[in-house]
Image (cartoon, rainbow, N blue to C red):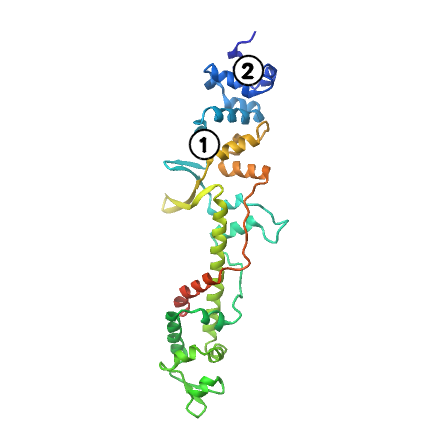
Amino acid sequence: MASLSDYIGMFNDGDWDEFSNIFGNDVSKFLLLIKRRGLLDQIDVDSVEYNDGALVNGIQLFMLENDPSYYNTIVKEFLSDVEIRNDGYYLRLRDLSELSEFFKDNSYSREYNDRDVVKNVLGEDWWDPYYDTVHDVYNDIVGALNEKNMELLSERVLELVGNKELSLDDYRSQLFEDISDGNNRFIITESNVKSVVEDEDSMNQLFDGDLDELKNQLKWLGDGSYNIAYNDEVYQEVFDELSTYFVGKHDWSETKKGEKIVHTPYIKIKDINRDIYNFLYCFKGYGDNLYQYGGYTSMVTLYMDNEDEWLTIRIPDYPDDRKVTEYINDGLPDRLYL
């Protein structure tokens, strides 16, 4: 009759099927007996995996349920993209856009693809999905300026078209007629430029004439502010959804390679024990295992795909007007002199 040591040897050689009936074909019963005899350390999980990939998930699951320290063993041996720190576990990313892999590829069912949107928002290149958002420069841009920026705009208008004769033949508004000299001429001066800037009709005529380049700059400011505000909103939505698996936002690690500084993003994993357990339980008895996938991202996304539990986001139709106004005012001083 075979001894327990013989069974352990057979098990490690991948011959579980030859004696599994003794334990009701339940590997956990066999392993529980091994544990009670103090021989659990003789189980060679690597050897078992080589012979039977489907069995290894059940073995590792048993290990976790009976020895919580085995979570660390799995992280160190199988999750090569995880860094253990004093305050927890951190996922090392190839680049920030790798986080898009946790989101659903749902282009077939929605007008936008969550995964592509996240990749664009988190990518290194600036994402500007909108253009030509300014339909009325005066109302959309000038009307959004705070008092300080209205003064800056007035100063710029004075620099561009001030203190020189302009003709009512080219620019005719009630204000221009009021400040004209009676000979079809008027001059924008320091004393009246604020009134000019505050008058929509007068500014629109100037925008279509001598201030056409300034008008273009203000349109670009509006488009840029719209896109930045939109990015902000989607970015926050992305990290709100990522909070299912991660804590907070990312940080960066600097590594010097020769003369080059390489910046690597990291993000703290919320509950790596839960994620490992879910994977092993999901694929217990199946061939997919940690030996094959070798990383946290691969492990979690395979689980998501099997359970159809992808992260998803709500894409706003347009950004918050208050944020657009904020960015217009932040960007105006630099845009005036481009």
Q: Nearer the viewer, residue 299 or 164?
A: 299
Give residue 26's position: percent from left, percent from top: 58, 20
Q: Is residue 275 above or below residue 112?
A: above
The quadrant in which the C terminus is found is bottom left
Give residue 50's position: percent from left, percent from top: 55, 24
Q: Residue at x 40, y 83 (%)?
A: 188
Q: Is residue 292 visible?
A: no
Amino acid on which disc 2 is placed: Met
Q: Quadrant of residue 38?
A: top left
Give residue 168's position: percent from left, percent from top: 47, 87
- Secondary element under disc 1, as helix, strand or loop, is helix
Q: Nearer the viewer, residue 260 or 285?
A: 285
Left or right relative to 243: residue 303: right
Q: Is residue 237 above or below residue 174?
A: above
Q: Residue furthest right?
A: 108
Give residue 121's position: percent from left, percent from top: 50, 52
Mark positioned earlier in the residue sequence (1 or 2): 2
Crowding around mark 2 (Cα neighbors within 10 Å: few <14, some 14 to 19, many 20+) is: some
Crowding around mark 1 (Cα neighbors within 10 Å: few <14, some 14 to 19, many 20+) is: many
- Between the C-alphas of marks 1 and 2, the distance is 27 Å
Mark 1 lies on residue? 75
The quadrant in which the N terminus is found is top right
- Secondary element under disc 2, as helix, strand or loop, is helix
Amino acid on which disc 1 is placed: Val
Mark 2 lies on residue? 10
